[in-house]
Image: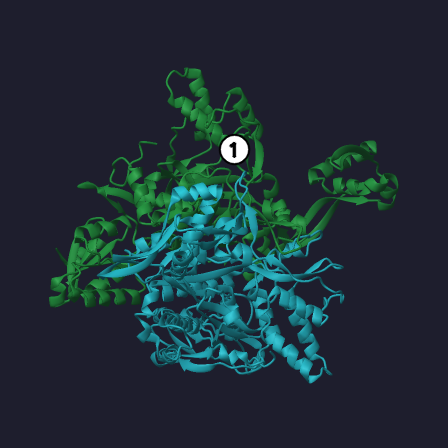
Chain colours: A cyan, B green
Amino acid sequence: MGSITDRSGRQFDRKAFESLLKRRFFFTESYQIYRTAPGWTGDNGGLFDYGPPGTALQNNIVHIWRKHFVLQEDMLELDCSILTPEDVLKTSGHVERFSDWMCKDPVRGQYLRADHLVEQVFSSRLSRDGLDEPTRRDYENVLAQIDNYSGDELGELIEKHDIRNPAGDGSVEPPIPFNLMFKSSIGPSSAAPIYLRPETAQSQFLNFRKLLEYNNNTMPFASASVGKSYRNEISPRSGLLRTREFLMAEIEHFVDPSGSKKHERFSEIEGIELVLLDRESQMTPTRTRTGRPMSVREAVHSRIIDNETLGYFLARTYLFLTKIGVDPKKLRFRQHLANEMAHYASDCWDAELLTTHGWIECVGCADRSAYDLEVHSKRTGEKLVVQERLTEPIEVVQWVVSLNKKLLGQRFRHHTRAVEQAVAALSQAELEASSTGLIADDRLELRIQINDVEEMVVLSSDILTIYKETRTEYMREYTPNVIEPSFGISRILYSLLEHSFWSRAEDSARSVLSLPVAVAPIKVALLPLSNHDSFNPFVKQVAQALRKLSITSRVDGSNTSIGKRYARSDEVGTPYAVTVDFDTVEDSSVTLRERDSTEQVRGPIKDILKVIDDLVAEKCTWDSVRRRLLPL
Amino acid sequence: MGSITDRSGRQFDRKAFESLLKRRFFFTESYQIYRTAPGWTGDNGGLFDYGPPGTALQNNIVHIWRKHFVLQEDMLELDCSILTPEDVLKTSGHVERFSDWMCKDPVRGQYLRADHLVEQVFSSRLSRDGLDEPTRRDYENVLAQIDNYSGDELGELIEKHDIRNPAGDGSVEPPIPFNLMFKSSIGPSSAAPIYLRPETAQSQFLNFRKLLEYNNNTMPFASASVGKSYRNEISPRSGLLRTREFLMAEIEHFVDPSGSKKHERFSEIEGIELVLLDRESQMTPTRTRTGRPMSVREAVHSRIIDNETLGYFLARTYLFLTKIGVDPKKLRFRQHLANEMAHYASDCWDAELLTTHGWIECVGCADRSAYDLEVHSKRTGEKLVVQERLTEPIEVVQWVVSLNKKLLGQRFRHHTRAVEQAVAALSQAELEASSTGLIADDRLELRIQINDVEEMVVLSSDILTIYKETRTEYMREYTPNVIEPSFGISRILYSLLEHSFWSRAEDSARSVLSLPVAVAPIKVALLPLSNHDSFNPFVKQVAQALRKLSITSRVDGSNTSIGKRYARSDEVGTPYAVTVDFDTVEDSSVTLRERDSTEQVRGPIKDILKVIDDLVAEKCTWDSVRRRLLPL
């Protein structure tokens, strides 16, 4: 990925970038002083602490997210428990399926994530000379779809291509699954495990009935949640991009599936053009695919995007990301391949941001259909449905079953319940077919489940009858479908920092973070020209006035040149600087400097404060300020 | 606690209050639909989900907290990992000491928290007639200090007073400690356990050096952190007041201990009067003690509060709590008893809020001395100190030790290290005394530690010499002390809801939550007089305009009387309501109603919007609005 450029169009200098983030305490590895201490036995990779600028940036991103989604769309925000009982996660499928494949190197006692192992070894082989063309193409083909292999397939690849642990060159055992949830137990006597949630979504589903009621039983509506989630990575890497604890912001938009998932406000965004990398474009066996720009209107119309609601959220996601400062040229929407999606999902798109680590999935936008509400409803017996009075009553024709319970109990004894369940599980189509069989042969073969073992039983018409029934329905009952835009805040934050980073042409050591004022950790740097005592009252006055306006500022009165201090405020992304100098003492005027252009204007403190207030509230632009005030 | 009154001075109706919180989805038990499902095996007591009004209220409280503390005092906010390695929590003492005492009822297989068991049984006996006076006094005396008993003492009480499990009357085993941290493991091969943090404080200490550097190496400064913490309660109770997962907001203020902990901004708050329940006032053996009002100036001056910085934060805490709507008459500051404090703490005060569950500790404000920085520094070898250039170099006279290592090794062989450690641990006073003994008798007796066993050794002056040394120091090096105000947001939120609750005199079924506008979940209710179509464009217009002003509103167009809908918005604490009626269609005027007074004014939509914007920004009061606009 050496071809990534920074904002100024020059080669991205990742070393300078990383040094900046560390030096200015955007974030740091957690427990760093312990990791280097003698006797340290822990593995705490993949855990990060945000320092003051990182925390402020994160808070600002979340604040804008809330305004952009929750406030603008009247979403119902929830704050739910992170600790989640096993039963819930069994139903959702996480206990069984939320895992990665890993291989053990028995000699080193080391565990390697299987797909990463293949990636690493193939990439290294590809970088060597002398590889024949068919092998090269084979490797590239595998790498292009590395996310889509099952454990068995990874095992075959490892065996076929003699893939070994790059550290020590030892061979590895076949892949085994490792569940990625952190497990704990609750209370002194509880036998049932409890997990740290892998996503905020499940609790939103579980509260569906309360949410619907809160919303006066009207549809559609969305819930939202911002909070920490967890993923016990086998071997975390890439800093903030793959962490074990991370902040998510998730929306669950509940929609009536019968209305082809139209969206009321679709017209507001349909003209927006997105770069789409759809399913088909990804079937080419190289990694150099590009997306194509297309309006949301066209994409939904041509069914590249499945429906209006999904299209609406992709466009709103685009608006959110670009508002906080993401470079639209480094943003694309990639559709999941069929085998990448959960089996119940009908469509799924990721917003991917281009970084020096490649294209990074930062937002997932999936149509989860009715799956989640249905499985939780089935497990708990709670109806997670919408009931709607029909404007016109309708006639419904249905196949129904009648059981002779007495005879059933006599014949099947303690298997009675299993038979009943198997009958209840028959679909309308199966009932229709069974009815015909029952009439023709007076027998119905049925598979029942007894302690995980399947058995075949035969029912006759003295026990069971199947017939058609016509009912008049006044209410319609349906399980809503769910469109889920899910935001990985830490990944967005990191990518945004990369997109904002550049160095001044005149001095490549002078780095700048061109963060938009709305997300910038500090809005104003306050700089006395020197540490002359007479400047203090003015610095204090401006600081206090800004505080009153709820505008964050930071005084830098350290003993270095004003130029160095400007540079210092540029590199944490502070958009404006106010300088107090000897003229200030004379006439109460100060200098206001803009970060990206380094242009300056001068005016009375009162006017400058008003200008800053307007700039921070985005009521005016720097251009208009230059016209309003005296440029220097 | 039957004597608690609500805001209107009437008896607090807890049943009505709890029904309101549940009905309007302020919060709910987590995983509720699972708890009632067949086959449920989990124990998830003490876990809660906040619904939309609860989440908004919580967000608003946190937002004001950040403005009041972080922004106003230039604090350095961090966001650190919740997952914490065992080593860190061993050093902090949590692995060993963060536990409650519990007794097992072997017949029922039930665990009971020991102090709660004593409390419950004594309270129940006290409520019965026929208890003799000495016993009654004895019980009351125990209950008054129930928080201060050790496990052994609780065991003695249980035996002496034949305390049994109220459920089933079975006798219980002696108390054993139960560690209250949730334990998990990290990665596939890690042997070391990892815990969910019990407080946010530790990571703030571990990042001290980076924070100091970020602050340009100047003191004093404070860090702050808002986030979830955990406590694996033995048997959670009292709803939001004792949960297993909760939101905390913690400040660590680092201060030079040599300056008698003065605070620069003390003068701004010294006149504030707080209700103080100091240590002495608590030694009376009844539960009916009252605090006494006293200015912070007087309390610090008379050393009731240990120092200015502690006093400053108590006053700032008072201002924060009353700003968000806590009733000052239900707020007191209680000093910890000597045996209640951690051994290293020099003073500690809790802000307690009076609720129907009694006085609830909602904020703890402790002077933790230099303990935390010192223990982490000792364990990791990292210097967690401040280095300050002295304006004048100083002469330092110190007792120092010189050891003849060769001789030491010969004489003590594999105990050499233990002797060295015992020598290194001698204080300046001990060195001075030892020096005298060494000169007089040529012998120094020393207690050394070998595998947890103490032994006495004798050193003579050929091995060890002690002498006075004078050095010139240009730098001063010290470990800062820490003042820690720690806020339990969930408890504050619950207490605030109780303090805000009352019922209208004319109709006790009409409940109101008089939340200040700044914390109210929704600022404006939008009510069309009926579902007449002509109202829709106006409702939409106002809703859109409010959204643009970032003011949360909620349309209630349901088919009930306007009075019922006013009542509905009152009970979620919405301070203002805008009503669209037939006059609106004529002249674009709307009605604005205030929640507490139910007074209404009328004006053009434009004017009303401006008024709402000013009211929400607290730029004007309702009184001034009544003068400005036409009252109805």
Q: Is residue B544 above or below residue B616?
A: below
**Can see residue B218?**
no
Q: Nearer the viewer, residue A123 or B419?
A: A123
Q: How far across and down, in percent of the image, does residue B578 sit?
A: 20, 59
Q: How far across and down, in percent of the image, does residue B15 sit?
A: 30, 38
**Can see residue B573?**
yes
Q: Is residue B632 above or below residue B366?
A: below
Q: Is residue A514 above or below residue A386?
A: below
Q: Nearer the viewer, residue B231 or A439?
A: A439
> At label 1, which amino acid type do we have?
Gln
Horizontal side of B387 relative to B225 (left or right) equals: right
The answer to which quarter of the image holds residue B614 is: bottom left
- Residue at x 36%, y 38% (from the top left corner): B355
The answer to which quarter of the image holds residue A224 is: bottom left
Horizontal side of A307 relative to A115 (left or right) equals: left
How many residues crowd mark 1 within 10 Å: few (<14), some (14–19), many (20+)?
some
Q: Nearer the viewer, residue B240 or A82?
A: A82
Q: How far across and down, in percent of the image, does residue A594 sit?
A: 44, 76
Q: Which residue is mark 1?
A: B110
Q: How far across and down, in percent of the image, does residue A604 sit?
A: 36, 72
Secondary structure of the residue carrying tag 1 is strand
From the image, which quarter does the C terminus of chain B lie in? bottom left
